[in-house]
Image (cartoon, rainbow, N blue to C red):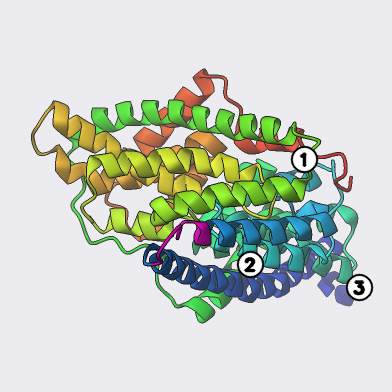
């Protein structure tokens, strides 16, 4: 009898199997996601070199980036024709699977998202790397769970956990990726899901850092915390950010409705035209397109950008992001949100300093950091995830208190405008062609 008591119970064996499966899938998405990020970084450098070369050409050099971006978008759209589930971010599909409204993704999604994402984002479309990485992680998690012969509820849970690990890889933010799976997707803190996500995220980010290096995504010099007297200004900024986030969400849905409503035009042709438009913007403002990491790093490094240029970058990205997403090619929304938030923070400080000249200019970098988290929180409606992701990506906590206050104010303002979270809206608009 004592031997029987010493045997682990079924729930314990099940939990061990889930955690081991999460580690294996986490290692896979860590290396694959790291390779995906490396490809995008290489594409960013090549794209900037291409634009520089085009500027030196005689005649209409602007046709070169237009053709390159159109070609990338066209090829990505052809991949989506092959695997329809590869379109867009994929995060809404991960949420639908967890809720039982869709079937877990198959492994064929992985090459479609990888290649399509490199083509679409690498060509300059204003899309984020996190959507493909989350969806690839979900596909790997579901496949690993199926091979481990886990029951259907655990397969759905595993695709969510490893999807969160995919976000952790995309942003080099293991805690943020874990919180994303819990706060945004499951909206719960069930112990088994927490453990699976933690194991997957730790394994994934460890492997990704082996590929790309063990450094934060953005370098921010050490700074003193802003004086508490500025806290009301950060709250006002947060309230305005919430309104801007609501506008951005409506722009995303407006472009989806109007571009999708052109049913007589083939989807591949629409993607090509959108790519050409983004390519033209790339010729004028090379840093205003793509994921936006280079632009964000410039802002966080204190690079001097005159206010009219900040306005130009912000307007281009506010329009180009939703327009790019309406192309229905692989790519997400998160990463572009961070660049918009940083630009918005820089613009707010610049305008405030013009109206009330003083020492507000010292708030430029802190306001950019706060803008990244607050804008993320307003659009996605996952405030804790946004705050933690920005802190992990920048390895700085100096603006934690203003970030908390401004993000809370931004989410409150977005709620008051009755603007639903963007992924809730996208999940409700999921194509009936998607597997359910």
In percent of width and height, residue 206 lies at 54, 75
Q: Which residue is disc 3 drawn over?
A: 1
CA neighbours of label 1 inside 10 A, class few (<14), some (14 to 19), many (20+): few
Instruction: Give the residue number, with chain letter if any, for mark 1.
Output: 265
User: In the rendered structure, which disc, 2 or 1, sits on the residue that comes first in sequence?
Assistant: 2
Q: CA distance from mark 2 to mark 3?
A: 34 Å
Mark 3 residue crowding within 10 angstroms, few (<14) / some (14–19) / many (20+): few
Relative depth, front residue between 195 and 301: 301
Q: Residue at x 23, y 56 (%)?
A: 303
Above/below status of 365 relative to 217: above
- Range of residues picked out in magenta: 57-65
Q: CA distance from mark 3 to mark 1?
A: 72 Å
Disc 2 + disc 1, Cβ < 8 Å:
no
Near-viewer residue (79 or 384): 79
Which residue position holds label 2? 199
**Which quarter shows the C terminus?**
top right
Q: Is residue 211 above or below residue 278?
A: below
User: Looking at the picture, how far across and down is residue 259, in whole percent?
Assistant: 69, 35
Q: Secondary structure at mark 1?
A: loop
Identify the residue at the far front of this view.
59
- Of label 3 and label 1, which has the lower sequence position? 3
Residue 101 seen: yes
Regarding residue 105, the answer to whether it shows in the image is: no
Q: Which structural element holds mark 2? A: helix
Q: Nearer the viewer, mark 2 or mark 3?
A: 2
């Amino acid at each position: 009898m004592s031997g029987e008591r010493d045997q682990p119970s079924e729930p314990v064996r099940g939990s061990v199997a889930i955690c081991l499966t999460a580690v294996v899938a986490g290692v896979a998405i860590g290396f694959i996601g790291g390779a995906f990020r490396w490809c995008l970084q290489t594409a960013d450098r090549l794209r900037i070199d291409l634009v520089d070369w085009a500027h030196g050409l005689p005649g209409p050099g602007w046709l070169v980036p237009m053709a390159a971006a159109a070609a990338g978008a066209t090829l990505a759209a052809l991949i989506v024709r092959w695997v329809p589930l590869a379109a867009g971010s994929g995060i809404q599909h991960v949420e639908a699977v967890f809720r039982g409204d869709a079937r877990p993704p198959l492994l064929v999604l992985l090459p479609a998202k990888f290649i399509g994402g490199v083509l679409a984002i690498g060509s300059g479309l204003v899309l984020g790397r996190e959507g493909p990485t989350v969806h690839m992680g979900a596909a790997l998690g579901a496949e690993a769970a199926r091979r481990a012969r886990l029951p259907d509820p655990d397969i759905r849970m595993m695709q969510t956990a490893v999807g969160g690990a995919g976000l952790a890889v995309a942003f080099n933010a293991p805690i943020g990726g874990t919180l994303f799976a819990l706060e945004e997707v499951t909206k719960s803190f069930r112990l088994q899901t927490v453990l699976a996500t933690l194991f997957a995220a730790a394994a994934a980010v460890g492997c990704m850092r082996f590929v790309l290096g063990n450094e934060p995504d953005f370098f921010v010099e050490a700074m003193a915390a802003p004086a508490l007297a500025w806290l009301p200004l950060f709250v006002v900024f947060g309230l305005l950010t919430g309104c801007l986030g609501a506008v951005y969400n409506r722009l995303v849905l407006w472009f989806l409705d109007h571009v999708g409503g052109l049913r007589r035009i083939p989807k591949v042709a629409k993607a090509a035209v959108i790519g050409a438009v983004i390519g033209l913007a790339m010729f004028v403002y090379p840093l205003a397109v793509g994921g936006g990491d280079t632009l964000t790093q410039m802002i966080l490094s204190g690079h001097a950008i005159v206010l009219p240029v900040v306005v130009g970058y912000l307007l281009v990205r506010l329009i180009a992001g939703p327009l790019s997403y309406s192309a229905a090619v692989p790519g997400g929304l998160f990463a572009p949100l961070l660049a918009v938030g940083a630009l918005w923070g820089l613009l707010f400080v610049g305008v405030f300093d013009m109206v009330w000249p003083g020492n507000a200019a010292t708030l430029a970098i802190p306001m950019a950091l706060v803008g990244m988290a607050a804008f993320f929180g307003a659009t996605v409606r996952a405030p804790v995830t946004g705050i933690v992701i920005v802190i992990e990506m920048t390895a700085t906590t100096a603006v934690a208190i203003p970030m908390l206050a401004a993000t809370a104010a931004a989410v409150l303002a977005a709620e008051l405008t009755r603007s639903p979270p963007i992924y809730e809206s996208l999940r409700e608009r999921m194509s009936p062609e998607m597997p359910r």
